[in-house]
Image (spheres, rainbow, N blue to C red):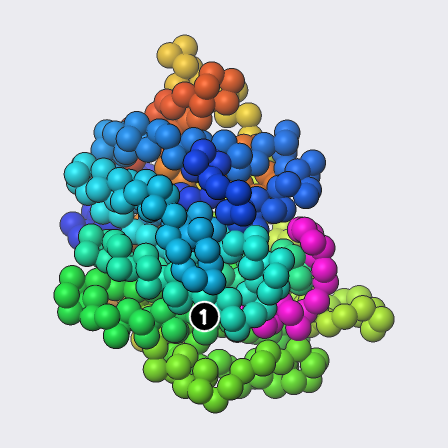
């Protein structure tokens, strides 16, 4: 197979991502500082692979200096993570800061900067406080929206002089989709209208924090930007037939445009409102709130992309005795002969990068954006160790390289994509899967005190960052 070299633009970010709850562990955590994830784990820990959860995670709380040294060794210039809302405050109503945790965050930010790594900070990565989840119903409450804005103000006041790129949420659609739409996570309540209210309230919260950001003049003072990190599901219809195209369009409305449109365009699609009214799942909103969303769109967007979604029109009857679910209009479709990651059960289709990039260019004003997560989870990676005990993850190198190839193709076509961040810097805990599927450039050895060791992909990534050269297959075999 012929190879060619693609050049990575000089100003193109090649970084890595993680989150607070998936890395920190519970060291130093006070009573009543549980997040939703902690609450779920405590009530339902048996569903987490081998019982691992957020209790220790990767122990980043105690080992951040060691990990940041590894980031520097790899050559990362940017690292995205989150601040754990549930731990940042001692009193969510009165916005009393936990000075011990705030000091830890301050130290992490300073350590990153001192090592030449730019921190990119998200305000919520599934870390809604358990107390607010139980007392108010979490993001179903407008009061929680206001408390989030107050929390955001405290964070910005502390760290806004050093952090340039801020994000309100990571994947704001995910938690409620798992809990209220598909009812596969604690407390297992299928309630589509509640799902929709959570979606709306998070979009409103983003707009209100953007408004706060503008009022405080961070862009003028520091050249800062504020955005949101979304996980659009690049969706393909089974066929060009109208019934399949309709299924894909409606899927896109419910799972992609529901956040893309208000965040970037400041408004919701008319067809989505029509569908919500038809199925009695309309969220509660006011004209003032919708105006706030319209006037306070984001500066940039992070997109998390892993695999394509393929849909077809329904071929089986809908059970009219069940509550409405968007799958009323579609069924998932498995493409025959697709390339798969057998460990994660996800299709591998790198052209999703090009296709989403063209969509951002053509439908969303070519707003500034970047890939905030992309990576490959593999089980039992110890099987791929060589005689030096280094994981030979050539599959990950190929995965990253092919996805980057299609992303750089889009940049050549004028897409305003500013970078790529691999998920994840180290192996870390994932919901339910725990440490089952490993994603890291750096191995976390659970059997040896969570010792760290660079994988082959880390050295490859280092060379990519230094050389700005990507050696790729020259064919377009995916299309």
Name the residue located 33 percent from the left edge and 59 percent from the top edge.
154
Is 231 displayed left or right of 458 in the figure?
right
**Number of callouts:** 1
Around disc 1, counting alpha carbons within 10 Å, would you say few (fewer than 14), some (14 to 19), or many (20 or more)? Answer: some
On screen, 259 above or below 390? below
In this view of the protein, which residue sits in the foreground, 250 or 133?
133
Which corner quadrant of the image does residue 411 belong to? Answer: bottom left
On screen, 223 above or below 438? below
In this view of the protein, which residue sits in the foreground, 392 or 18?
18
Residue on which the image places disc 1: 146
Element class at badge 1:
helix
The quadrant the N terminus occupies is top left
In this view of the protein, which residue sits in the foreground, 166 or 131?
131
Residue 196 within the segment the image draws in magenta? yes
Name the residue located 73 percent from the left edge and 72 percent from the top edge.
324
Name the residue located 25 percent from the left edge and 64 percent from the top edge.
225
Residue 377 visible, this angle: no
Q: Position of residue 348 (x, y in %)?
A: 51, 46
Is 149 displayed left or right of 46 in the figure?
left
In this view of the protein, which residue sits in the foreground, 462 or 51?
51
Q: Position of residue 397 (x, y in %)?
A: 38, 35
Residue 390 within the segment the image draws in magenta? no
Instruction: Spot the residue most to the top.
Output: 387
Residue 249 visible, this angle: yes
Name the residue located 76 percent from the left edge and 70 percent from the top edge.
323
Residue stretch in magenta: 183-200
Which corner quadrant of the image does residue 161 belong to? Answer: bottom left
Q: Position of residue 340 (x, y in %)?
A: 56, 42
On screen, 250 above or below 189? below
The quadrant the C terminus occupies is bottom left
């Amino acid at each position: 197979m012929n190879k060619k070299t693609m050049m990575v633009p000089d100003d193109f970010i090649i970084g890595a991502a993680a989150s607070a709850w998936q890395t920190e562990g519970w060291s130093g955590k006070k009573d009543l500082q549980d997040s939703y994830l902690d609450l779920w784990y405590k009530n339902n820990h048996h569903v987490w692979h081998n019982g691992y959860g957020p209790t220790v995670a990767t122990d980043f709380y105690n080992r951040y200096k060691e990990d940041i040294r590894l980031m520097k060794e790899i050559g990362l210039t940017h690292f995205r993570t989150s601040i754990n809302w549930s731990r940042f405050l001692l009193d969510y109503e009165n916005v009393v800061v936990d000075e011990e945790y705030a000091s830890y965050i301050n130290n992490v930010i300073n350590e990153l900067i001192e090592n030449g790594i730019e921190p990119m900070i998200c305000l919520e990565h599934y870390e809604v406080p358990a107390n607010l989840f139980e007392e108010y119903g979490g993001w179903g409450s407008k009061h929680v929206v206001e408390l989030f804005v107050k929390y955001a103000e405290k964070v910005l006041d502390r760290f806004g002089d050093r952090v340039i790129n801020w994000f309100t949420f990571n994947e704001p659609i995910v938690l409620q989709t798992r809990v209220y739409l598909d009812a596969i996570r604690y407390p297992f309540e299928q309630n589509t209208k509640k799902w929709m209210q959570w979606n709306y309230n998070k979009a409103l919260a983003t707009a209100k924090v953007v408004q706060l950001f503008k009022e405080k003049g961070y862009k003028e003072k520091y050249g800062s930007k504020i955005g949101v990190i979304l996980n659009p599901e690049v969706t393909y219809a089974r066929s060009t037939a109208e019934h399949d195209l309709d299924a894909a369009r409606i899927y896109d409305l419910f799972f992609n445009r529901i956040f893309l449109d208000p965040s970037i365009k400041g408004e919701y699609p008319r067809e989505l409102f029509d569908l919500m009214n038809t199925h009695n799942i309309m969220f509660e909103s006011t004209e003032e709130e919708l105006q706030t969303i319209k006037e306070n769109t984001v500066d940039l967007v992070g997109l998390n992309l892993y695999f394509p979604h393929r849909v077809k029109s329904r071929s089986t009857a809908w059970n009219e005795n069940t509550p409405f679910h968007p799958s009323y209009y579609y069924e998932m479709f498995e493409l025959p002969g697709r390339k798969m990651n057998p460990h994660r059960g996800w299709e591998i289709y790198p052209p999703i990068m090009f296709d989403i990039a063209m969509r951002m260019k053509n439908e969303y004003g070519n707003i500034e954006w970047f890939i905030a997560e992309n990576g490959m989870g593999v089980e039992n990676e110890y099987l791929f160790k060589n005689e030096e005990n280094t994981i030979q993850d050539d599959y990950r190198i190929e995965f990253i390289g092919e996805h980057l190839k299609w992303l750089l193709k889009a940049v050549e076509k004028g897409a305003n994509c500013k970078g790529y961040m691999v998920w994840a810097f180290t192996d870390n805990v994932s919901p339910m899967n725990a440490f089952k599927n490993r994603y890291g450039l750096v191995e976390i050895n659970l059997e040896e005190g969570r010792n760290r060791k660079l994988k082959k992909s880390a050295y490859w990534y280092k060379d990519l960052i230094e050389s700005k050269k990507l050696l790729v297959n020259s064919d377009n075999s995916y299309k």
